[in-house]
């Protein structure tokens, strides 16, 4: 299941095939609340089409009735009504045009409303779902690509609901109506005209096929550009300070040029196709005028009818140009929908773990028993890990970079599933406890402390709790964050992207305050003081000590002094526990810990 999730589904090259029926079934809950509005809109489309089709008909009638002077009869018959004066015709005609405008306007408005609402709900569902996806999903999908895909996919679907579907239907209706009218007006003329139809159909089909390929390439390039851009912003300091810049610029220029070439090709093909369709339109007018002149001479058609015929043809060619474009958009939107459904569908299994099962209450006891784990099947990361810790006690984990320290945390917090062995909370197996509840009771302070943009209050206040400002201020005080009140504006301090304007030590203290505010049962420090200067480190240590009291603490460090006070220390090498015991026990053992200690002192 997890492996399935971990696939990079946003790679443009990859097409996820989902049957249309399944797609509709999945989207139905989003569509259902607005289905009635959509039905109403469809009815309005019929009305709009009818009104639009009546205009050339009336124009033709008006020609014969009022303009062509040879006619003996002055006036026209419309649906059995005898309209004698041009003024009353004008009034009727204006009324129809006005109605058309109003109906067309309301139809667009309703459709836009329904479409936007559907998309709003879909976007919310997508966002909330993605915030629960397993971390493995994000290992494989880069953030730049995710952002551009999710935004792009939702936008594509938006377009489908608001402009593609209904307009395609409208165009189709209009064209069918026109064909029927043309054939009833004059079979011979309509037949001449229909000779062009295969040419049109084939060229549109060819055009769509070529364009689809190019569009896909363009989208792929945009995704890559976004990806490298977001990567560049993340690593802007590296790029600006050392040779990263040249390499990055080279790669970016290459991508940009490829995008340019693809776009240019698109424009070239577009500007060949559009005039071609235009040419066919002019050709058909020529045919009608040529053939129609014979009809007029032998009196089988009136001038008004020819005028109506020509107007209908113009109406016929207008949607033709757009239909191929709309068809592309539809195809696009469908593959977007497939991807969105795929995301929404991913990993219901993890949800089952997170959503249901036991609430164990306060975490008082954690034990790992013969835990084996690997990110990818081939390389085993953790081997036979067994340890136990309970309330008020602390575990220190030391070991080289890459020895698997953080991976242990990833398992305890349920971010990845175990290969074998078990993790017990209060003697209950992790797979049967509500992991969200465990996460809520856990505070994680990491090496690269992360603050969201917003105020300090928003950053440290736990969600769904009624903790007030004075308690938040206490948390800040406990975490040695008095500088916030001295240098900044306390809880109101505005944090910008990347934690500006705080220093990394200050950021870390705020993270500890956040942990204080959430009043956790389990507190985990993952190399929380690694990059700190000695003064910041002291402050952080002091805050850590206060925070650990009466809780379970897991402290990861590569500096031994950080874990010295821990009740139990694990020495990890290559994913296995080499030694385990208190500082004095391990020193007495004169093994790896002792060895490391001596090296550190030198
Ligand atoms: N998301 C991941 N996917 C695949 N391998 C990973 C992932 N995270 C870490 N690893 C690998 O697991 C090993 C242990 O990593 P980690 O637990 O982060 O080490 P430590 O925290 O001790 O430095 C490393 O070899 C690392 O390359
Ligand atoms: Mg680590």
Image (spheres, helix red, strand yellow):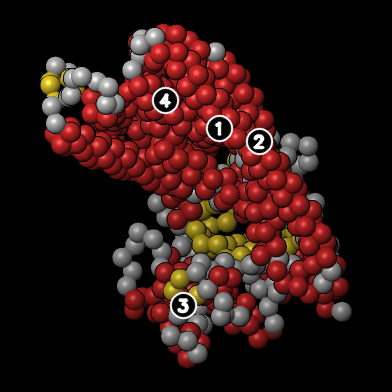
Is the residue under label 2 in contact with that under label 1 (CB below 8 Å)?
Answer: no
- Where is mark 1, residue-wise? 278
First in sequence, mark 1 or 3: give its number. Answer: 1
Q: Is residue 541 visible?
A: no
Q: Earlier in the sequence, mark 4 or mark 3?
A: 4
CA separation in Å, label 1 and label 2: 10 Å
Instruction: Identify whether 577 is placed above or below 28.
Output: below
Residue beneath disc 2 = 272
Q: Say which mark, if any, is on residue 494.
A: 3
Give x and y (percent) for residue 54. Answer: 28, 26
**Comparing labels 4 and 3, the label whose residue is closer to the camera:** 4
Between the residue at mark 4 and the residue at mark 1, the CA separation in whole angstroms equals: 15 Å
Label 3: state its secondary structure. Answer: strand
Residue on which the image places disc 4: 310
Q: Residue at x 87, y 79 (%)?
A: 602
**Nearer to the camera, 297 or 559:** 297
Q: Secondary structure at mark 4?
A: helix
Q: Residues within 10 Å of mark 4 (few under 14, many from 20)?
A: many
Label 2 CB, ligand 1: below 8 Å? no
Front tag of 4 and 2: 4
Horizontally, residue 426 falls left or right of residue 450, namely left
Q: Earlier in the sequence, mark 4 or mark 1?
A: 1
Query: Marks 4/3: CA distance?
Result: 66 Å
Cβ of mark 1 under 8 Å from ligand 1: the answer is: no
Q: CA distance from mark 4 to mark 2?
A: 25 Å
- Dot 2, how many residues are within 10 Å of its Cα: few (below 14), some (14-19), or many (20+)? few
- Give the CA distance from mark 1 to mark 3: 58 Å
């Amino acid at each position: 299941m997890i492996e399935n999730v971990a696939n990079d589904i946003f790679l443009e090259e990859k097409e996820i095939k989902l049957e249309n029926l399944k797609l509709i079934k999945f989207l139905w809950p989003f569509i259902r609340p607005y289905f009635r509005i959509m039905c109403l809109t469809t009815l309005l489309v019929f009305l709009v089409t009818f009104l639009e089709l009546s205009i050339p008909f009336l124009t033709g009638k008006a020609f014969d009735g009022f303009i062509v002077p040879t006619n003996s009869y002055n006036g026209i018959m419309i649906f059995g009504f005898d309209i004698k004066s041009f003024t009353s015709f004008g009034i009727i005609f204006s009324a129809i045009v006005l109605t058309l405008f109003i109906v067309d306007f309301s139809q667009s408005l309703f459709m836009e409303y329904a479409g936007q609402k559907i998309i709003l709900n879909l976007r919310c569902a997508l966002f909330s779902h993605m915030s629960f996806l397993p971390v493995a999903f994000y290992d494989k999908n880069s953030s730049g690509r995710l952002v551009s895909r999710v935004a792009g996919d939702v936008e594509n679907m938006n377009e489908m609901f608001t402009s593609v579907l209904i307009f395609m239907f409208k165009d189709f209706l209009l064209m069918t109506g026109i064909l029927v009218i043309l054939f009833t007006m004059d079979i011979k003329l309509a037949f001449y005209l229909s000779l062009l139809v295969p040419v049109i159909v084939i060229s549109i089909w060819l055009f769509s096929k070529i364009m689809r390929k190019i569009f896909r390439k363009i989208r792929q390039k945009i995704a890559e550009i976004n990806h490298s851009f977001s990567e560049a912003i993340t690593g802007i300091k590296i790029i600006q300070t050392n040779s990263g810049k040249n390499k990055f610029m080279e790669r970016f220029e290459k991508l940009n040029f490829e995008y340019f070439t693809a776009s240019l090709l698109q424009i070239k093909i577009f500007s060949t196709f559009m005039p071609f369709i235009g040419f066919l339109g002019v050709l058909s007018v020529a045919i009608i005028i040529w053939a129609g002149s014979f009809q007029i001479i032998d009196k089988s058609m009136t001038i008004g009818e020819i005028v109506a015929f020509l107007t209908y043809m113009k109406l016929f060619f207008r949607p033709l140009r757009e239909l191929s474009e709309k068809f592309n958009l539809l195809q696009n939107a469908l593959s977007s929908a497939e991807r969105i459904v795929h995301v929404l569908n991913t990993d219901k299994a993890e949800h089952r773990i997170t959503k249901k099962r036991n609430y164990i209450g306060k975490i008082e006891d954690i034990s790992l028993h013969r835990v084996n784990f690997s990110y990818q099947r081939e390389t085993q990361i953790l081997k036979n890990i067994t340890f136990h810790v309970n309330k008020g006690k602390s575990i220190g984990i030391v070991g080289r970079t890459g020895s698997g320290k953080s991976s242990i945390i990833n398992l305890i917090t349920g971010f990845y599933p175990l290969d074998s062995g078990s993790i017990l909370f209060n003697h209950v197996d992790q797979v049967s406890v509500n992991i969200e509840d465990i996460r809520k009771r856990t505070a994680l302070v990491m090496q690269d402390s992360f603050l969201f943009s917003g105020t300090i209050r928003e950053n440290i206040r736990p969600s769904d709790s009624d903790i007030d400002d004075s308690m938040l201020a206490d948390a800040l005080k406990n975490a040695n964050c008095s500088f916030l009140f001295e240098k900044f504006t306390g809880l109101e301090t505005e944090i910008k992207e990347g934690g500006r304007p705080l220093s990394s030590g200050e950021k870390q203290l705020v993270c500890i305050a956040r942990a204080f505010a959430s009043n956790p049962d389990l507190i985990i420090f993952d190399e929380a003081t690694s990059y700190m200067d000695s003064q910041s480190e002291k402050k952080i240590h002091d805050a850590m000590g206060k925070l650990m009291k009466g809780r379970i603490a897991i402290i990861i460090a590569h500096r031994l002094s950080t874990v010295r006070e821990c009740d139990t220390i694990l020495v990890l090498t290559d994913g296995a526990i080499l030694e385990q015991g208190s500082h004095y026990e391990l020193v007495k053992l004169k093994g790896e810990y002792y060895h490391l200690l001596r090296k550190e002192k030198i």
